[in-house]
Image (cartoon, rainbow, N blue to C red):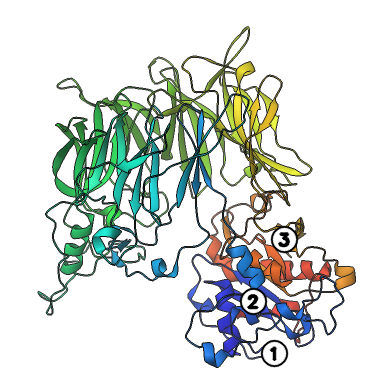
Amino acid sequence: MNQMVRGLHKVCHRGVSLLTPSSLSPPIFLCLKLGRVPGHLRTHSIKTTTAMTASRLHHLVPIHSVSSKNDGTNGSLSSSNAVATEDEDNLEGRYRLPPPEIREIVDAPPLPALSFSPQRDKILFLKRRALPPLEELARPEEKLAGLRIDGKCNTRSRMSFYTGIGIHQLFPDGKLGQEIEIQGFPDGAKLNFVTWSQDGKHLAFSIRIDAEDSSSSKLRVWVADVDTGKARPLFQSPDIYLNAIFDNFVWVNNSTLLVCTIPLLRGDPPKKPLVPLGPKMQSNEKRDIIQVRTFQDLLKDEYDEDLFDYYATTQLVLVSLDGTVKEIGPPAVYTSLDPSPDEKYILISSIHRPYSFIVPCGRFPRQVGVWTTDGIFVRELCDLPLAEDIPIAFNSVRKGMRSINWRSDKPSTLYWAETQDGGDAKVEVTPRDIIYTQQAEPVQGEGPEILHKLDLRYGGISWCDDSLALVYESWYKTRRTRTWVISPGSKDVAPRILFDRSSEDVYSDPGSPMMRRTSTGTYVIAKIKKENDEGTYILLNGNGATPEGNIPFLDLFDINTGSKERIWESDKEKYYETTVALMSDQTEGDLYLNQLKILTSKESKTENTQYYIQSWPDKKSCQITDFPHPYPQLASLQKELIKYQRKDGVQLSATLYLPPGYDPSKDGPLPCLFWSYPGEFKSKDAAGQVRGSPNEFPRIGSTSVLLWLARGFAILGGPTTPIIGEGDEEANDRFVEQLVACAEAAVEEVVRRGVSLLTFCMDPTSIPLWC
């Protein structure tokens, strides 16, 4: 029995497994991924008997699901799909391969990532491999200040990578030109951080090569000419390496990058002392009672502090494409680099000591300053102290300046938010947050200006111009979210609320504004004009949640009157389509509706995602990709959005996946896997709303539960598991009761459909819990 439990944990990863074993019929395995699991759920075990004795993943097929005769039906598994013949004793402690039918899916080449040039005339195909090699996963890692660091590469550990770059010309008619492959870097190189220059003529990226020599494993910055595809190292010196623990590099202008490098004189890592310098002490003499959340991988002692400084300390370097190098500022733990839209200034953030043993690096003392792009320090914006005292209540934040950014519609104007409640969400105060703006180099004696005051917690700004910006605020406890319309350049125009709704109510979501790219590389709200119409229109891109599933849409929205016109909507019957990006923003000036171009994606239950360009006014659609099905053996799998009710009347939904050709009336019941994650809600109505689409393409990753379709399992994907706390009630007050009720309802539904059977000696309300 213990072996079977261990096998189930390999399927469920971290979570609670609800198992109804039977020696006569296919069992149901229910895996519930839990975020915060009550302590009493972590120690339950049960005593039962079962015909299943195998402990390994590929043995998790019930004996009775293997047909005694191979009649070609899909409800039975052939002998090749049944129990593996390997001797467990001989394989104990070794890596083993999954069955061929799963291995073929896992090893299928993934789709390339796509990246469009700033001018929208070229597309990068960033090529990937299915899985990282084992030696990459086995590399030692340093766990410091909430980070996991690969010391050999001086990056975050287990970082994914690209294996190659292909460039295609995108013609006005939507057709792609021949691929130009980026060449010049060594075979086996792993590529990261691929970015375009603003003029679209060059690419910058990092390269690392696995080698015994530790210096060869460190990241180097390369650049490539887009027209020729030829790549070369950016630095002439072979001893300059990228430090990618926090930020990596940014284009300052079309010919210059600001790069985070490993200091040349860094030396070897500090050695752990054989004897501690002294006892580890923590004091609360001030009697400040601080509740702190549980964080992983924190600093433990002075040696960890030194090791964190060793790996995270960066020397900033300005380097031009001709190889000219200039150091900027002293070495420090720089965490972010953000050039201003006019390319005159850089917003630079860093963290410094004193560090903490109870919170991660995101709460360490933080300094933010403004520098010129030629390396001259302008001024310090703030130097925030260590933030160990942020309350654990939702919506609590750090004191002082936060979310410091450049206005995307201005050359060099900063904006930020400051809390008025001391960062404590439990404090009742109005306003709760104030948004400020200020020039990078203000006139002497000129202080920051108040842009807007908020009674909820600040959530960001979408900029357009001096006449229009959208400000977002929300409050988790009530799930309230509001969107304000402001005129940043007109103090006499009063702010007004555009949307005021519940964040849980996905059916009422109006969508988000589509953004257009500016000549400086920033993104602002796209204003749309109609012929012979003086109205101010924007495009709202929404998921379109409905009781039948998501039906994405694009609305032409009059920002002044609130009227809207649906100018595009996804197919409802067979396909799932989404709007991805605006493609007609490559030139300056007004955007007219009849000249609109939108990049969309299109997929179905059986057809892989493809990309199209939709052109107005006739909404002509031109396909620009033709990706094959990654796992054709499952091309005809069955997928259905099903609905059912919990015993308290809450509406639930799930996606039922069945193997290709399976018919429950002919083939009988199957073993069934459930995969779910509880969600917290304040409203029963919102908890019962349908999320997702039945027409989405079923993507199967290396850890996906859908892999078991290839082994003849039925899969109930994402059965909704709402944990509801209405009014003053907290969701955790009835966590277990509601969790079990959701599981019962899901089990009863698949049994009712004849997909699986529940033939256990106890009634369905007594489903045992494992953790």
Considering only vertical position in the picture, is 297 above or below 548?
below
Viewport quadrant of the C terminus = bottom right
Of the numbered discs 2 and 3, the one sitting upstream in the chain is 2
Q: Which element is circle 3 on?
A: helix
Cα separation, mark 1 vs mark 3, equals: 30 Å
Residue 587 image position (x, y, % from top left): 48, 19
Pointer 3: what residue? 634
Pointer 1: what residue? 50
Nearest the viewer among 614 and 90 is: 90
Considering only vertical position in the picture, is 108 above or below 230?
below
Q: Residue at x 25, y 25 (%)?
A: 344
Mark 2 against mark 3, which lies toward the viewer?
Answer: 3
Of the numbered discs 1 and 3, the one sitting upstream in the chain is 1
Q: Is residue 7 left or right of residue 553?
A: left
Pointer 2: what residue? 18
Identify residue type, mark 1. Answer: Thr
Mark 1 against mark 2, which lies toward the viewer?
Answer: 1
Q: Which element is circle 1 on?
A: loop
> Mark 3, residues whose alpha carbon is within 10 Å: few (<14), some, or many (≥20)?
some
Nearest the viewer among 252 and 755 is: 252
